[in-house]
Image (tube, grey):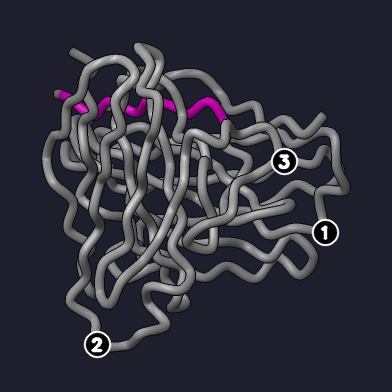
C-alpha cells in the first residue's frame, strides 16, 4: 500500500489558520479523491472531521475544511482554538485497504 | 444513538490468546460491516480488516492474516476480535469501527491490550 506522509507537527496561535498536508506516492488519482481526516485527542478514539476530501459530517465545525491538489490532500483549521490541540490523521479509502497517514500533532501556542 | 462499547483492558503474557468484544447499539447491527483498527503506542491507526455482519465473512489486511480472527454474535449485536499467539508487538489499542453515514464515522472507545512477560 502507498504510504501517506504528513508533517510531524504544525503549530499556530489562537485565531490563526493552519494547514496540514497529506502526500501520497500513488500515481492513481483516485487515491486522493476518497480522503478523510480524523482528529484524535489523547486517550480518545479518532473522530471523523472531513470525508471525501472536503465534506463535513453533521455536527463538525465549518472551521475544518479539506481540499486536494495533485497528489496532496490538505486539511485547514481556521480560527484555531485550544480544543484543536490534538493529533490529526488523513486516510485514503481509494483501495480495498484503507491507509492512514503518518499523523500530525497540532499545537496551539 | 449509535454506540460501540468495547470490552476492558487486557494484560497477557506472550504466547497467550485474547478475545475482545464490541457491542453495538442504536442501529441494525447486520446492516453495516464492522472494521477493526489497531493503534500501537505513539503510532497512527492501522486498518486490520473488516467483517461482513450479514454473512460473517471476514477480510483481513496484509499483516493480520493468521493469528487474528474476526467473529460475530449477532444475537447480541457483538463483534469479536481474537488474537492468538500474542507477541509483545501486539501491544496496542484496538478499535472497532463502523461506517453508518460516512467513512469510518463511529468508533468504539478502544481496548488496550498489553503483552508482557
Badge 3 is on which residue? Answer: B78
Quadrant where the N terminus of chain A sits is: bottom left
Tell me the residue at 16%/33% (across/down). A10
Looking at the picture, tell me which residue is in the foreground, B75 or A53: A53
Instruction: State the image coordinates of residue A69 (x, y, percent, origin top left).
Output: 31, 71
Q: Nearer the viewer, mark 2 or mark 3?
A: 2
Tell me the residue at 82%/59% (across/down). B31
Looking at the picture, tell me which residue is in the foreground, A72 or B97: A72
Q: CA distance from mark 1 to mark 2?
A: 34 Å
Q: Is residue B27 left or right of residue A32?
A: right
Q: What range is drawn magenta here? A: B108-116
Q: CA distance from mark 1 to mark 3?
A: 13 Å
Residue B115 is covered by the magenta coloring: yes
Can the viewer see residue B71? no
Instruction: State the image coordinates of residue B20 (x, y, percent, origin top left).
Output: 52, 35
Tell me the residue at 17%/58% (across/down). A5
Crowd rating for badge 3 (residues with CA inside 10 Å; few <14, some 14–19, many 20+): many
Task: Tell me: residue B49, above or below residue A102.
Answer: below
Q: Nearer the viewer, mark 1 or mark 2?
A: 2
> Which chain letter matches label 2?
A
Residue closest to the far bottom? A28
Crowd rating for badge 2 (residues with CA inside 10 Å; few <14, some 14–19, many 20+): few
Task: Tell me: residue B55, above or below residue A84.
Answer: below
Residue B101 is covered by the magenta coloring: no
Secondary structure found at label 1: helix
Badge 2 is on which residue? Answer: A27
Q: What mark, if any, has residue A42 been given in the picture?
A: none
Q: What mark, if any, has residue B31 been given in the picture?
A: 1
Crowd rating for badge 1 (residues with CA inside 10 Å; few <14, some 14–19, many 20+): few
Say yes or no: labels 2 and 3 on the same chain.
no
Amino acid at each position: 500500500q502507498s504510504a501517506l506522509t504528513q508533517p510531524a507537527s504544525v503549530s499556530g496561535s489562537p485565531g490563526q489558520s493552519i494547514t496540514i498536508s497529506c502526500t501520497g506516492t500513488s500515481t492513481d488519482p483516485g487515491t486522493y479523491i476518497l480522503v478523510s481526516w480524523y482528529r484524535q485527542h489523547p486517550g480518545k478514539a479518532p473522530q471523523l472531521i472531513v470525508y471525501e476530501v472536503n465534506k463535513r459530517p453533521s455536527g463538525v465545525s465549518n472551521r475544518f475544511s479539506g481540499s486536494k491538489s495533485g497528489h496532496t490532500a490538505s486539511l485547514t483549521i481556521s480560527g484555531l482554538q485550544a480544543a484543536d490541540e490534538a493529533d490529526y490523521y488523513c486516510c485514503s479509502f481509494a483501495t480495498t485497504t484503507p491507509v492512514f497517514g503518518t499523523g500530525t500533532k497540532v499545537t496551539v501556542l | 444513538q449509535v454506540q460501540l462499547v468495547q470490552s476492558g483492558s487486557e494484560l497477557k503474557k506472550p504466547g497467550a490468546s485474547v478475545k475482545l468484544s464490541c457491542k453495538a447499539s442504536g442501529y441494525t447491527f447486520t446492516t453495516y460491516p464492522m472494521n477493526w483498527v489497531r493503534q500501537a503506542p505513539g503510532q497512527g491507526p492501522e486498518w486490520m480488516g473488516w467483517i461482513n455482519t450479514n454473512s460473517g465473512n471476514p477480510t483481513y489486511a496484509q499483516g493480520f492474516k493468521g493469528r487474528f480472527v474476526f467473529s460475530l454474535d449477532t444475537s447480541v449485536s457483538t463483534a469479536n476480535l481474537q488474537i492468538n499467539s500474542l507477541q509483545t508487538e501486539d501491544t496496542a489499542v484496538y478499535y472497532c469501527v463502523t461506517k453508518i453515514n460516512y467513512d469510518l464515522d463511529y468508533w468504539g472507545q478502544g481496548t488496550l491490550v498489553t503483552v508482557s512477560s
